[in-house]
Image: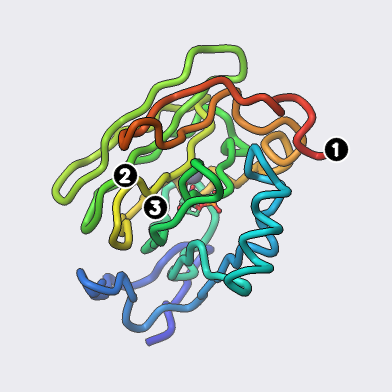
Amino acid sequence: MQIKIENGAVAFPFSIKINSVTGKMDDYDTHIERFLSTLVSIFSDPDAAEDFIEKNGDTLAYEVYEKNIPEVNGEIRFCSSITYPGKIGNEYFMTKGHFHSRLDTAEIYYCIRGNGCILMEKKDGNPILEDMYPGRVVYVPGYYAHRSINIGDEPLISLPAYPGDAGHDYKSIEDNGFRHIVVEKNGKPALLENPRYGRMGK
Ligand code: PAN
Ligand code: ZN
Protein backbone atom coordinates (compact mmCIF):
# COMPACT_ATOMS: atom_id res chain seq x y z
CA MET A 1 0.00 0.00 0.00
CA GLN A 2 1.42 3.36 -1.01
CA ILE A 3 0.86 6.06 1.61
CA LYS A 4 -1.44 8.73 0.18
CA ILE A 5 -0.21 12.26 0.85
CA GLU A 6 -2.46 15.33 0.86
CA ASN A 7 -1.18 18.85 1.59
CA GLY A 8 2.22 17.32 2.41
CA ALA A 9 0.84 15.06 5.16
CA VAL A 10 -0.32 11.45 5.46
CA ALA A 11 -3.93 11.43 4.22
CA PHE A 12 -5.28 8.19 5.72
CA PRO A 13 -4.61 6.07 8.79
CA PHE A 14 -2.59 2.93 8.08
CA SER A 15 -0.95 0.09 9.93
CA ILE A 16 1.96 -2.25 9.27
CA LYS A 17 3.40 -5.31 10.98
CA ILE A 18 6.97 -5.81 12.17
CA ASN A 19 8.05 -9.43 12.46
CA SER A 20 9.24 -9.81 16.05
CA VAL A 21 11.79 -12.51 15.15
CA THR A 22 13.39 -11.08 12.00
CA GLY A 23 12.52 -7.39 12.40
CA LYS A 24 11.29 -7.28 8.82
CA MET A 25 8.49 -4.77 8.23
CA ASP A 26 5.76 -5.82 5.84
CA ASP A 27 4.82 -3.34 3.13
CA TYR A 28 7.89 -1.15 3.73
CA ASP A 29 8.92 1.59 1.30
CA THR A 30 12.66 1.76 1.96
CA HIS A 31 15.17 -0.89 2.98
CA ILE A 32 18.67 0.21 3.99
CA GLU A 33 21.42 -2.37 4.46
CA ARG A 34 24.69 -1.37 6.11
CA PHE A 35 27.56 -3.77 5.45
CA LEU A 36 30.80 -3.65 7.44
CA SER A 37 32.79 -2.52 4.39
CA THR A 38 30.91 0.81 4.57
CA LEU A 39 31.33 1.10 8.34
CA VAL A 40 35.05 0.45 8.82
CA SER A 41 35.75 3.99 10.03
CA ILE A 42 33.07 4.01 12.76
CA PHE A 43 35.03 1.48 14.80
CA SER A 44 37.81 2.54 17.12
CA ASP A 45 40.11 0.02 15.39
CA PRO A 46 39.45 0.28 11.64
CA ASP A 47 42.33 -2.12 10.88
CA ALA A 48 40.57 -4.79 12.94
CA ALA A 49 37.42 -4.14 10.89
CA GLU A 50 39.40 -4.63 7.65
CA ASP A 51 40.86 -7.87 9.06
CA PHE A 52 37.38 -9.07 10.04
CA ILE A 53 36.11 -8.51 6.49
CA GLU A 54 39.16 -10.21 4.99
CA LYS A 55 38.57 -13.26 7.18
CA ASN A 56 34.76 -13.47 7.18
CA GLY A 57 33.75 -11.63 4.02
CA ASP A 58 31.66 -8.52 3.98
CA THR A 59 29.01 -8.84 6.68
CA LEU A 60 25.64 -7.17 7.22
CA ALA A 61 25.98 -5.22 10.48
CA TYR A 62 22.55 -3.56 10.53
CA GLU A 63 19.52 -2.83 8.43
CA VAL A 64 16.48 -0.60 8.53
CA TYR A 65 12.99 -0.91 7.06
CA GLU A 66 10.88 2.20 6.86
CA LYS A 67 7.75 3.81 5.53
CA ASN A 68 8.17 7.01 3.55
CA ILE A 69 6.32 9.30 5.89
CA PRO A 70 6.71 12.98 4.94
CA GLU A 71 9.64 14.71 6.61
CA VAL A 72 7.51 17.53 7.92
CA ASN A 73 6.49 18.97 11.26
CA GLY A 74 3.51 17.13 12.74
CA GLU A 75 4.22 13.72 11.18
CA ILE A 76 5.99 10.91 13.06
CA ARG A 77 8.54 8.85 11.17
CA PHE A 78 9.28 5.34 12.41
CA CYS A 79 11.16 2.29 11.23
CA SER A 80 12.33 -1.16 12.17
CA SER A 81 16.01 -1.06 13.09
CA ILE A 82 17.90 -4.38 13.23
CA THR A 83 21.48 -4.49 14.50
CA TYR A 84 23.16 -7.89 14.21
CA PRO A 85 25.35 -9.50 16.86
CA GLY A 86 29.10 -9.38 16.35
CA LYS A 87 32.29 -7.61 17.39
CA ILE A 88 35.25 -5.90 15.79
CA GLY A 89 37.99 -6.77 18.25
CA ASN A 90 36.15 -6.10 21.51
CA GLU A 91 33.83 -3.43 20.11
CA TYR A 92 30.24 -4.49 19.47
CA PHE A 93 28.42 -4.08 16.16
CA MET A 94 26.47 -0.82 16.18
CA THR A 95 24.70 1.71 14.01
CA LYS A 96 26.53 4.75 12.60
CA GLY A 97 24.70 7.06 14.95
CA HIS A 98 23.75 10.68 14.37
CA PHE A 99 22.47 13.94 15.74
CA HIS A 100 19.15 15.10 14.41
CA SER A 101 19.58 18.01 12.00
CA ARG A 102 16.99 19.81 14.07
CA LEU A 103 18.92 19.36 17.27
CA ASP A 104 15.94 19.95 19.54
CA THR A 105 13.98 16.93 18.28
CA ALA A 106 13.65 13.86 20.52
CA GLU A 107 13.08 10.18 19.71
CA ILE A 108 11.84 7.02 21.38
CA TYR A 109 13.17 3.50 20.79
CA TYR A 110 10.92 0.57 21.65
CA CYS A 111 12.89 -2.68 21.90
CA ILE A 112 11.26 -5.73 20.32
CA ARG A 113 14.02 -8.35 20.49
CA GLY A 114 17.59 -8.79 21.67
CA ASN A 115 19.94 -7.30 24.19
CA GLY A 116 21.80 -4.07 23.73
CA CYS A 117 21.96 -0.43 24.58
CA ILE A 118 21.56 3.05 23.22
CA LEU A 119 24.59 5.29 23.63
CA MET A 120 23.63 8.97 23.92
CA GLU A 121 25.95 11.96 24.05
CA LYS A 122 25.48 15.70 23.89
CA LYS A 123 28.08 17.64 21.91
CA ASP A 124 30.01 18.45 25.08
CA GLY A 125 28.37 16.28 27.71
CA ASN A 126 28.76 12.98 29.51
CA PRO A 127 27.73 9.70 27.88
CA ILE A 128 24.46 8.05 28.86
CA LEU A 129 23.97 4.35 28.20
CA GLU A 130 20.43 2.95 28.43
CA ASP A 131 19.70 -0.78 28.30
CA MET A 132 17.59 -2.28 25.53
CA TYR A 133 15.73 -5.55 25.95
CA PRO A 134 12.25 -6.62 24.85
CA GLY A 135 9.56 -4.29 26.13
CA ARG A 136 12.01 -1.55 27.08
CA VAL A 137 11.47 2.02 25.85
CA VAL A 138 14.38 4.44 25.69
CA TYR A 139 13.72 8.16 25.44
CA VAL A 140 16.38 10.10 23.55
CA PRO A 141 15.97 13.80 24.31
CA GLY A 142 16.83 16.48 21.77
CA TYR A 143 20.50 17.50 21.45
CA TYR A 144 21.75 13.93 22.06
CA ALA A 145 23.60 11.99 19.39
CA HIS A 146 22.45 8.36 19.57
CA ARG A 147 23.38 4.93 18.30
CA SER A 148 22.18 1.33 18.90
CA ILE A 149 24.71 -1.23 20.10
CA ASN A 150 24.11 -4.98 20.12
CA ILE A 151 25.77 -6.58 23.16
CA GLY A 152 23.94 -9.92 22.82
CA ASP A 153 24.01 -12.92 20.54
CA GLU A 154 20.74 -12.39 18.65
CA PRO A 155 19.50 -9.52 16.48
CA LEU A 156 18.72 -6.33 18.37
CA ILE A 157 15.38 -5.20 16.94
CA SER A 158 13.76 -1.89 17.82
CA LEU A 159 11.15 0.53 16.64
CA PRO A 160 12.53 4.07 16.67
CA ALA A 161 10.01 6.91 16.22
CA TYR A 162 10.89 10.58 15.77
CA PRO A 163 9.43 13.86 14.51
CA GLY A 164 9.01 14.05 10.75
CA ASP A 165 11.17 17.14 10.43
CA ALA A 166 14.02 15.87 12.68
CA GLY A 167 16.43 15.16 9.79
CA HIS A 168 19.74 13.34 10.24
CA ASP A 169 23.19 14.85 10.70
CA TYR A 170 25.67 12.01 10.16
CA LYS A 171 28.64 14.22 9.34
CA SER A 172 29.47 15.33 12.89
CA ILE A 173 29.76 11.69 13.94
CA GLU A 174 31.60 10.67 10.77
CA ASP A 175 34.18 13.40 11.42
CA ASN A 176 34.52 13.14 15.20
CA GLY A 177 32.92 9.90 16.35
CA PHE A 178 31.29 9.53 19.74
CA ARG A 179 33.44 10.47 22.72
CA HIS A 180 32.91 7.00 24.10
CA ILE A 181 32.87 3.43 22.86
CA VAL A 182 31.22 0.32 24.25
CA VAL A 183 33.46 -2.75 24.32
CA GLU A 184 33.34 -6.18 25.88
CA LYS A 185 35.59 -6.38 28.94
CA ASN A 186 35.72 -9.50 31.13
CA GLY A 187 32.57 -10.76 29.39
CA LYS A 188 30.60 -7.58 30.11
CA PRO A 189 30.00 -4.32 28.25
CA ALA A 190 32.22 -1.48 29.37
CA LEU A 191 32.11 2.21 28.47
CA LEU A 192 35.55 3.58 27.55
CA GLU A 193 36.88 6.80 26.08
CA ASN A 194 37.16 6.67 22.30
CA PRO A 195 40.88 6.82 21.49
CA ARG A 196 40.05 8.18 18.02
CA TYR A 197 37.56 10.85 19.13
CA GLY A 198 37.91 13.99 17.00
CA ARG A 199 39.77 12.28 14.19
CA MET A 200 37.46 9.51 13.02
CA GLY A 201 37.47 10.82 9.46
CA LYS A 202 41.29 10.69 9.24
C1 PAN B 1 16.87 5.45 13.85
C2 PAN B 1 18.17 5.14 13.08
C3 PAN B 1 18.42 3.67 12.76
C4 PAN B 1 19.72 3.46 11.98
O1 PAN B 1 15.76 5.25 13.03
O2 PAN B 1 18.16 5.90 11.90
O3 PAN B 1 18.49 2.96 13.97
O4 PAN B 1 20.80 4.13 12.57
P1 PAN B 1 21.62 5.25 11.78
O5 PAN B 1 20.61 6.24 11.25
O6 PAN B 1 22.51 5.88 12.80
O7 PAN B 1 22.34 4.60 10.65
C5 PAN B 1 16.96 6.90 14.28
O8 PAN B 1 17.60 7.20 15.24
N1 PAN B 1 16.33 7.79 13.52
O9 PAN B 1 16.34 9.11 13.83
ZN1 ZN C 1 17.59 9.47 15.45
Q: Residues within 10 Å of mark 1 (few under 14, many from 20)?
A: few
Amino acid tagged 3: Ile
Q: Residue at x 69, y 64 (%)?
A: 37
Who comes first in sequence, dot 1 or dot 3?
Answer: 3
**Which percent across, then down, holds residue 69?**
46, 64
The residue under label 3 is 76
Q: Quadrant of residue 99?
A: top right
| Front in this rendered view, residue 6 or 177 | 177
Amino acid tagged 1: Lys
Q: Residues within 10 Å of mark 3 (few under 14, many from 20)?
A: some
The residue under label 2 is 116
Q: Distance of mark 1 from mark 2, alpha carbons?
A: 28 Å
Work out whether residue 15 can be spotted: no
Quadrant location of the N terminus? bottom left
Quadrant location of the C terminus? top right
Q: Distance of mark 3 from mark 2, alpha carbons?
A: 24 Å
Q: Residue furthest right?
A: 202
Q: Residue at x 48, y 66 (%)?
A: 63
The residue under label 1 is 202
